[in-house]
């Protein structure tokens, strides 16, 4: 059986550093660890359409952006299968069968769906497809018999829902589906990176994201104008590091060797934090340091992106091949699911013979 990863992203925009520390960086490490037998990375366009039905062009445009972000972050098609969700018809078929195993009230209680409904002002008119996307996500995960799903914290309710479906399916139809585990970032700051404006989440619509594909200059500007502790007005003032996005980003990105290289007055982040808390350390100095740390991480990604951008047709070919491979795997799972549900009539010899007897026994 082995260890299998499945994860993915909705293609509704370019990926930002929140995606990167929350999941993408980890995927690359897992890919290169050699500990996994198969790795599937999915561009979830069908899921993106569940709340962008009237804007398919946005989804269409962002597929290539996300693919470029994946490749430049270090996902390697030789080691990981990169594919597009809508190209795997088995996923919709699985979803339809799983729908029978989930109640409406259970979906209504899903915290992620709840907050997304609020965010999109869907209250009065929730599209059915959107409402049921946790079920389709269970299909994504189980189609590949994933053991491990590396995602951000916001996806926890989706994993719980998937585990319930797996349990229910296996109980009703017999052991068929693999029970997946979530894999969260172990660095707490990486669970959910706030926006550059201090808002809880990076979001395209709030304009508070640092994108993996931003230019060096854009990144610098965004960092230098980041929100910090609003009460830290003068350098001498004591500052607060908790909830201060500049320090949260440092928690997520910086390592001791960065101090040696860029800010040798301090040994590590604890010392820097202590000075800021005491007072006497200005925001500009901290931001300049953060900028160096983040630029060091993003520069190679940006360089690789430029290379991949030179041959866009090759990126589509890679996705097409990945989708074919993914479809073959999903088809096997679907066949197994249908066998377990006994809706494999034409290969079920016993059924056909039994029915033949039933209709002809008196004769
Ligand atoms: N819901 C995920 C997101 O919004 C994307 C996604 C779709 C996904 N299917 C998945 C993630 C399966 C992990 C596993 O980012």
Image (cartoon, helix red, strand yellow):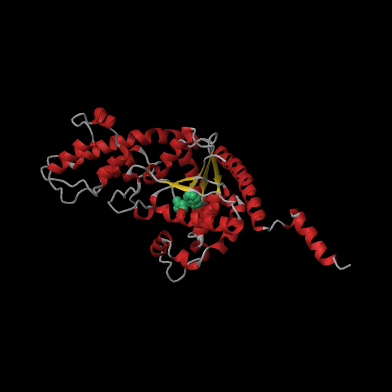
Left or right: residue 234 compared with residue 250? left
Whether residue 272 sits left or right of residue 142 in the image: it is left
Residue 315, position as x, y percentages in the image = 54, 39
Quadrant of the rendering where the N terminus is positioned: top right
**At x 18% / y 51%, what residue is drawn?**
230
Report whether 227 appears left or right of 72. Answer: left
Residue 220 in percent (x, y) is at 30, 40
Q: Name the residue rendered at 34%, 44% in the picture.
A: 190
Q: Residue 247 appears in which quarter of the rendering?
A: top left
Q: Residue furthest bottom?
A: 124
The spot of residue 159 in percent (x, y) is 46, 53
- In the depicted view, which residue is nearer to us: 100 or 257? 100
Return the x and y of residue 295 as percentages of the image width and height: 33, 35
Question: Is 301 situated above or below 13?
Answer: above
Q: Which residue corresponds to the image point at 15% horizontal and 39% vertical from the top-left?
A: 275
Residue 266 visible from this viewpoint: yes
Q: Is 169 placed left or right of 307 in the picture? A: right
Find residue 187 and report its image quarter: top left
Q: Residue furthest right?
A: 363
Report the residue that reaches farthest toward the left.
236
Residue drawn at x 60%, y 50% as measured from the top left: 88
Is any atom of residue 9 visible in this view?
no
The residue lying toward the viewer, choosing from 352 and 45, is 352
């Amino acid at each position: 059986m082995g260890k299998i990863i499945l994860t993915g992203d909705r293609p509704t925009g370019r990926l930002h550093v929140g995606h990167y520390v929350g999941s993408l960086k980890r995927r690359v490490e897992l890919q290169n660890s050699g500990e996994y037998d198969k790795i599937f990375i999915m561009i979830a366009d069908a899921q993106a359409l569940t709340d962008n039905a009237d804007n398919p062009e946005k989804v269409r445009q962002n597929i290539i952006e996300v693919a470029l972000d994946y490749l430049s972050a270090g996902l390697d098609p030789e080691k990981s299968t990169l594919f597009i969700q809508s190209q795997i018809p088995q996923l919709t078929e699985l979803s339809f069968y799983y729908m029978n195993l989930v109640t409406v009230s259970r979906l209504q209680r899903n915290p992620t769906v709840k907050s997304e409904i609020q965010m999109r002002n869907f209250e009065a008119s929730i599209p059915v497809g959107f409402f049921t996307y946790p079920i389709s996500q269970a299909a994504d995960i189980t189609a590949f018999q994933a053991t491990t799903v590396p995602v951000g914290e916001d996806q926890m309710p989706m994993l719980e829902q998937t585990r319930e479906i797996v349990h229910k399916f296996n109980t009703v139809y017999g052991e068929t589906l693999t029970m997946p585990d979530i894999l969260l970032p172990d660095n707490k700051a990486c669970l959910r990176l706030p926006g550059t404006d201090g808002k809880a989440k990076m979001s395209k619509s709030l304009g508070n994201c640092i994108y993996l594909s931003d230019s060096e200059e854009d990144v610098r500007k965004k960092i230098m104008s980041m929100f910090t502790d609003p009460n830290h007005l003068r350098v001498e003032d004591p500052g607060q590091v908790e909830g201060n996005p500049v320090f949260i980003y440092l928690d997520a990105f910086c390592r001791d060797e960065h101090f040696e290289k860029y800010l040798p007055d301090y040994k590590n982040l604890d010392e820097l934090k202590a000075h800021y808390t005491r007072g006497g350390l200005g925001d500009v100095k901290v931001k300049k340091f953060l900028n160096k740390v983040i630029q060091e991480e993003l520069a190679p990604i940006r360089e690789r992106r430029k290379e991949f951008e030179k041959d866009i047709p090759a990126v589509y070919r890679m996705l097409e091949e990945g989708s074919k491979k993914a479809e073959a795997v999903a088809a096997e799972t679907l066949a197994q699911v249908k066998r377990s549900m006994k809706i494999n009539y034409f290969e079920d010899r016993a059924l056909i013979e039994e029915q033949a007897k039933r209709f002809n026994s008196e004769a």
